[in-house]
Amino acid sequence: MSEHMSIICFPLEQRLIRPLQQPLAEFCLARSGNRSIEFANAENWFLLLRILRRMNKDLLLAFDVGTSSVRAALVNQAGKILAFAAKELEQIIPRSGWSQQSPRRWWEGLTFSIRSVLPRVPKSAERIAAIAGCGQMHGTVLVDDAGELVLEEVPLWNDKRTRELVERFSAEQDAESLWGITANPPTVAWPAFKLAWIKQNLPKAYEASRTVLMPKDYINFKLTGERKIDLSEASSSYLFDFQSGKWSEKLLGLFSLDPGKLPGISRATELLGTVTEEAAKSTGLRVGTPVATGAGDFPVSLLGAGVIRPGIGCDITGTSTVITTLAEQPATDPMISNIRAIIGGWAAFTIVDASGDAVRWVRRIFQQQETHSYDQIMSLAAGAPAGSDRLLFLPYLNGERIADQPNSRAQFFGLTSGHQAAHLYRAVLEGVAFAAKKNIELMNARGCHLDRMVTAAGGAKTRLWLEIKASVYNAPILVPSEPECGVLGCAILAGVTAGFYSDICSAVTSLVRYDGEVLPKPAWRERYQAMQSLFNDLYRSSENFWDRLGTLI
C-alpha cells in the first residue's frame, strides 16, 4: 500500500467555509495535471466528505427573547438580515414593583417568529449552519426533572419584589468584602435574590425545581434539551466567583441555596447542542441543526454595535436604557454594576429600568382617547419645543435596581393646562435622556470614562430621540447601519460557532458598519443643561417622599 492515497476530485462551485482550513492543511493537491487530492491519513477523507455535505449551509439563525417582543432573523455570512419577524410580549404587573412573564409565551413567540422567517428565504431550514440567541437577563426560570415549568410566570430583571431581602442582606453581610467574589453590589435584579425569595415564599416550587435557567437558556433548553448558562449571565447572578470562574460555594451558603440547581457554564460561542426532533416539529427547523450557548441581550448588543474595546460608551435602549463601557477590570463602585464581556474583560454599566417601557406606557395612557402609532408619537413629540415648555418627567415607573432609594417613582413636574399630548410625549423622551445623563455623570465621576457613544437596540431607530440624547449628553452618538444590534451580535456568535468567522473581534470588525453620527443641537444643548440641573434636584428632593408613599394604604 502506498504512503499516500489518491482520491478523484470534482469541481467545487461553492467557497469552502472556514472550518475546512484545518482539515485542508492535512492534505495536498496531487501533481500538476492530475485532478486528485492526496491524503496522509485516509480518515481525513471522511472528514472532508462530512464537511462537503455541509457546504450548502450558508445561513445563520439569530433570536432575541426581549421583554417587549421575541424576534428571529435569518442572516447571511455578510451580516445582512434576509428575513426578520417579531411577536410582541406584555409584562404582567400583579402589584407595584413586580414584573413577570410566562416562559411559555417566549417559546410561542419564538416558534411564531421562526416559522415566519423560514418561508421568506428559499430552502432556509436546510441552509442554516448554526443558531445563536440572546435574551433579557436575570429572569429566573425554574424547570423540574421532566423539563416542565415549575412556575408559570417568573420574575423578570426589572422585578423589585426582593427589595426588602436585599436590604436585609446588605445590613447583615459585608457587601464590600463580597465584592472580591461577585464584582458587583447586591441589587434586586440579581437571580440570587430572586431565587432566595422563591425559596422563602414559594418553597414547594423551589423544592420541585431541578434547574434554574435564564430566559434565553430556557429557550435553548426547549431547542436542544440541554441545561446550561453562559459566562456573562453567570457573572451577573450574584452567585458566581469571578476569580475562580465557578459558582461560589460561599455565596450559595449565604443564601442557603442548593448548588445542584445551578446549570453548567459555557462560553457564548460554545456548541450547546442540536435541535431536537420535538423542537424541529414546533419550529420548522431541521433536526440536528447546531445551537450555540449564546449570551444575554446586553453583552450581545455590544458586539452588534461594534463596541469591543475600552473607552467607547454604548447607549442600549430597548425596554430599559443601559449605559455601559468596556474595561479590563470591573468597576469598584456600589452604584455601578459589572458583567463579563463576551470578548473578555468587563462591561461596567448603569441602567434606567423604564425607557422604551415609559414610551409604551404613555402611548397606552393616551390610547384611551386616540390611538397613536410609535411613528405618530415621535412626530407629535417633534412638534413640541425642546424642554416641552418647562415640563419634566422622572421615568422611574419600575423603580431602580441601584439607588439610595430603589423604590423611586415616576412623575411629571410642571404640568399646566397648556400642555398637550405632544408635550407629554416629548417630556418622556427627554426624561429618559436626563436619567441616563445622571448615570453618565456618575460613571464619569467614578473613572468609567465614555470617550465616545454608540447607540444600539430599538432606540437606535428613532432620530428624534437620538437628537435629544446627543444634546442632553453633549456628545455625538454613532449610529450603526444595522439597528438590530442584538440580532447581528447573535449572528456573529452563531457564525463563529459554525466556523464562518475565525473569532468574534474579526467578525465584528468586518460586519459592523455605521451610518454616521447624530450631533448635539446647540440651542437644545443649552436648554437641556439647565433642565438637567433641575431634574437632578427634583430627583433628590423626591427621595424624601417615596418611603412615605409606600406606607399609604
Image (cartoon, rainbow, N blue to C red):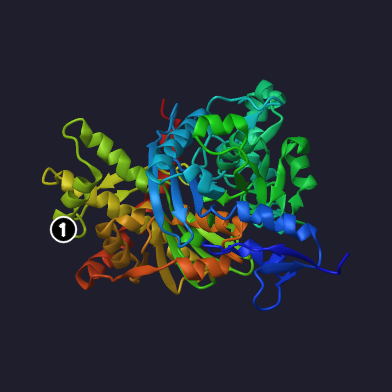
Label 1 belongs to which residue? 385
Count of marks placed on residues: 1
Question: Image height check: is 414 above or below 314?
Answer: above
Which amino acid type is marked by label 1? Answer: Pro
Residue 239, x across and y down, in percent: 70, 46
**Residue lying at the far left of the rendered structure:** 418
Residue 515 location, quadrant: bottom left
Which residue reaches farthest bottom?
32
- In the picture, the quarter occupied by the N terminus is bottom right
Residue 86: x and y in percent read: 39, 41
Answer left or right for 231 relative to 453.
Answer: right
Task: Find the residue positioned furthest to the front.
Answer: 33
Quarter holding residue 177: bottom right
Residue 541 against residue 549 in the figure, above or below: below
User: Is residue 243 visible to the viewer in this orientation of the structure?
Assistant: no
Residue lying at 45% horizontally and 31% vertically, measured from the top left: 551
User: Which residue lies at the image location 41% right of the left edge and 42% below the top edge?
Assistant: 117
Lateral position of residue 141 relative to residue 156, left or right: right
Q: Closest to the observer: 147 or 389?
A: 147
Quarter occupied by residue 440: bottom left
